[in-house]
Amino acid sequence: MNEIRVFCPATIANISCGFDVLGVALDSVGDEMVVRKIPEKGIRITKLEGQDLPKETERNVAGVAGLTLLEASGYDGGFEIEIYKKIKAGSGIGSSAASSSGAVWAMNELLGRPFSKIDLVRFAMEGERLASAVAHADNVAPALYGGFTLVRSYDPLDVVSIPNPPELYATVIHPQIEVKTSDSRSVLRTKITLAQGIKQWGNVGGLIAGLFTNDYDLIGRSLEDHIVEPIRSILIPGFDNVKSEALNAGALGCGISGSGPSIFAFCKGETIAKKVSESMKEVYQDIGIDHDVHVSKINTNGVRAI
Amino acid sequence: MNEIRVFCPATIANISCGFDVLGVALDSVGDEMVVRKIPEKGIRITKLEGQDLPKETERNVAGVAGLTLLEASGYDGGFEIEIYKKIKAGSGIGSSAASSSGAVWAMNELLGRPFSKIDLVRFAMEGERLASAVAHADNVAPALYGGFTLVRSYDPLDVVSIPNPPELYATVIHPQIEVKTSDSRSVLRTKITLAQGIKQWGNVGGLIAGLFTNDYDLIGRSLEDHIVEPIRSILIPGFDNVKSEALNAGALGCGISGSGPSIFAFCKGETIAKKVSESMKEVYQDIGIDHDVHVSKINTNGVRAI
């Protein structure tokens, strides 16, 4: 096999109480990439459609992640990459992670799978380092493992797959305003109270337990964030209304996707998820902010060949 | 049925990363109580053997917890309680919780089970309020539910049962020094860094996932506490040695039980648990501190009739 076309899922990171540790892959929104082996060493981005992003290998997240894999592989040749972006950069649903993860997953396939999933996470994290100056794993882990993932630890890197109930759907709305990841980081306080921490890890425990036992109510009760959401949501116009409308329409819970501005809701079943998406849209229609909305099953495979 | 004899298990609370939220019930150490219906209103502690504790109803945790249940029940009569303490008060393995939980569980049986488990937790928490001025649930919840329990939230009270791998054993050593719960509370800092919090809730997620999937290694990796243990362990002579000896002997993880001074270790299988108990004992033999040691399966029932 010299060429492969892959689907690279969008992902929600920072799932409410799971700030910096919990992410999930989506099924109905993602990029496509074509990766092919070439005899020349190195990596070339030969096409980049859908978004205005750098094509130079060293300035492109897929290029940088791919170079890390290439170096580790000892492979003599190189790769050409075509990227068909459907995820908007800066939307908060793992645009850079999709590209980084797709590139390294595809290359690993073409080389006969010399690397494990955790290796691929490490390579893809280098793409994240380029995109946001921090080599975080909370989008690339779900993009590569599929489903929900917990990044238990960075040193050593430890990624845990968490199952999900079959009827769990995600609704994501992207209000088209710019919130830079760096700004979104800088508003955070470096200290929290022990009492806030206890609430947060109680909720993380509840969310994980709910995902294991298909307990939708427990999932909903655990989707609380007393630490980051109250601060970051100030950067997202309409957040409080979107959240309350989503909950009124039957969402289990609702929060900021990644570092925003996208807002996600989890729902039981597609019917409710669609109703929730309508209620979220109405808020931005009323305010007059352009927006995209996605309703998606949980993607339990991660990046896949198509 | 007018009389019941019950076993009231010891419990480990504050399980490493699960400070204030995660507890577990033990099988081989606990109190016994006899509770019988009497026609007179109120509660009388007619016997209290094994520990020097107050017998006056209003000053006894079983009495106070029982009175709370009695009032809620509308029952015309009352109860007599005999308490045979085997858990040492102040040892850090839920001595007061065993008495409170045993009393309310037994009374609920004698009244034909009018109350749910979560009701019983609420009643037993009043005994904890008497014992330590805080109505905490992290010992009474595992004492009543059995196994591992997560107190996800206090407002509203939300207790989640967590399964455990069949070969999981606990080893607990109690060095006979006094560490008051109130002192142990007062050394804690009221603020933590966000980075510490993220590590802690990553570990809570990993521990819960490991318990659900019988992944002993993941359980071991997740038994970390970067927040409370470094501070509280200073109050427990020999703690660092006990911990390193336990891990060397094959324990999955090791930490402070409750607010100390007892130290627990989790192990895979009874053979390792016994070996770990020997290595922990040696530390206190060398220092010359009296100690008790318990090796126990996880108690998956909670309080039970015997």
Image (spheres, coloured by chain):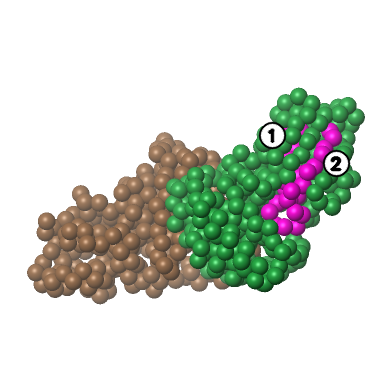
Chain colours: A green, B brown
Q: Which residue is mark 1?
A: A306
Q: Position of residue A274 (x, y in %)?
A: 56, 55
Marked residue chain, label 1: A
Residue B6 within the segment the image draws in magenta: no
Is A89 a magenta residue? yes
Q: Secondary structure at mark 1?
A: loop
Q: What residue do we see at 40% from left, 71% from top? A: B134
Looking at the image, residue B189 sits to the left or right of residue B86; the answer is: right
* Residue sitting at x 50%, y 51%: A269
Query: Front-most of A195 and A178?
Result: A178
Q: Residues within 10 Å of mark 2 (few under 14, many from 20)?
A: few
| Residue B293 at x, y percent in the picture | 38, 49
Q: Amino acid at mark 2?
A: Lys
A173 or A118: which is nearer to us? A173
> Hey, what amino acid is under mark 1?
Ile
Over which residues does the magenta segment extend? A79-108
Residue at x 74% of width, y 34% of height: A5
* Total marks placed: 2
Calculate the distance from the C-alpha at mark 2 to the C-alpha at mark 1: 18 Å
The numbered mark at residue B296 is none
* Callout 1 crowding tier (Cα within 10 Å): few <14, some 14–19, many ≥20: few
Outermost residue toward the left? B39
Q: Residue furthest top?
A: A1
Task: Tell me, for residue A47, which label it has, or none.
Answer: 2
Of the residues under marks 2 and 1, which one precedes in the sequence? 2
Badge 2 and badge 1 in a common chain: yes
Quadrant of the rendering where the N terminus of chain B is positioned: bottom left
For the residues labelled 2 and 1, say whether their Cβ atoms are less than 8 Å apart: no
Q: Nearer the viewer, residue A12 or A76?
A: A12
